[in-house]
Amino acid sequence: MKVIDIDGYIGGWESDAEHIKDNMPKSGDVTIKINSGGGSVFEGFEMYNVIKDYTGGEVFVEIGALSASAASFLAMATPVKNIKVHKNSTFMIHMVSTLAVGNAKELEKEAQIMAQMDNLLVDIYAENNEVLSYDEIKEALEEETYYIGGQAIIDAGFAGSLIDSNEGGKASKKDAQAQIKEMLNRFKDEQVKSNFVNSATKYLDKKTKKNFKQNTKSKTTKQENKMDLNKLKAEHPGVYAKALADGVQSEKDRVTLG
């Protein structure tokens, strides 16, 4: 049977939809092994769709130490009876989270989008769950619920059976939270990167010209006015680097990640 491993940040290297597409056989049963603290909800949706749309055979899911956030609804792409967990597995579900910068109207719009996405998540978790009701699953998402230990996951209706193994160890909520925090920090870093670059570039456009003028008073005014960012970077890398650093720091001071 073909085995596909999803290990790490959802949306990262070999943990994205392309990885699944590239490794899905044309026919035959497939086992998806998941050990992830989550990541990009949109990439998770696409991975879910790829798995759910597979018609070449049955899809089985094995949950490792952790299946949380985007990695948890990814596991729901196959019937619950086909989902197996280890004795020390942890399964976590929560509402969509994001980082947003803007005015009140823009933030309100972002909140509305997230609420709609939360409803999509509830639909996914509730589709094959014969234990919890729709409202109970929605409440579990709102509370950010951890199901620690394979039997707890099964009892909540998110898995069908335990993997027949003799693994030892005990599931730890602290370890699971640490891995999820690492995933969220990585997601935040990637999400704010474009904001920093855009704001820093605008800041840089003004700052570098000012710094360049202060450091090249002996040159003609025409030369100062014609200096663009690419030329400045090539001829005066020190000035360029200082201005860019100032721009990024200015943007960091303005934005609070929470």
Image (cartoon, helix red, strand yellow):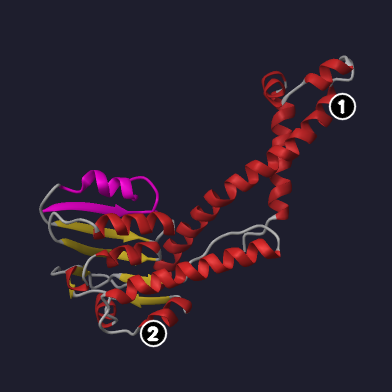
Q: Residue at x 86, y 15 (%)?
A: 219
Image spot of residue 225 (x, y percent) = 83, 22
Q: 210 and 173: which one is in front? A: 210
Give left or right: position of 32 versus 252. left
Say if residue 39 shows up in the picture: no
Give left or right: position of 26 versus 14. left
Instruction: Name the quadrant of the C terminus.
Output: bottom right
Give the mark toward the camera: 2 or 1: 2
* Residue type, numbered disc 2: Glu
Image spot of residue 57 (x, y percent) = 12, 57
Contact (CB < 8 A) between labels 2 and 1?
Answer: no
Image spot of residue 256 (x, y percent) = 67, 59
N-terminal-most mark, 2 or 1: 2
Based on the picture, tell me whether residue 8 belongs to the magenta stretch.
yes
Q: Residue at x 72, y 41 (%)?
A: 247
What segment carries the magenta color?
A: 1-25
Quarter of image, res 122: bottom left
Image spot of residue 172 (x, y percent) = 36, 72
In the picture of the structure, the residue carrying the numbered disc 2 is 136
Whole-angstrom CA distance, mark 2 to mark 1, is: 64 Å
Give left or right: position of 96 versus 213. left
**Residue 214, labelled with which disc?**
1
Mark 1 Cα shell of 10 Å, populated few (<14), some (14-19), many (≥20): few
**Residue 163, labelled with which disc?**
none
Quarter of image, res 221: top right
Q: 122 and 1: which one is in front? A: 122
* Residue type, numbered disc 1: Gln
Mark 2 Cα shell of 10 Å, populated few (<14), some (14-19), many (≥20): few
Q: Residue at x 67, y 23 (%)?
A: 230
**Above or below for 88 versus 199:** below
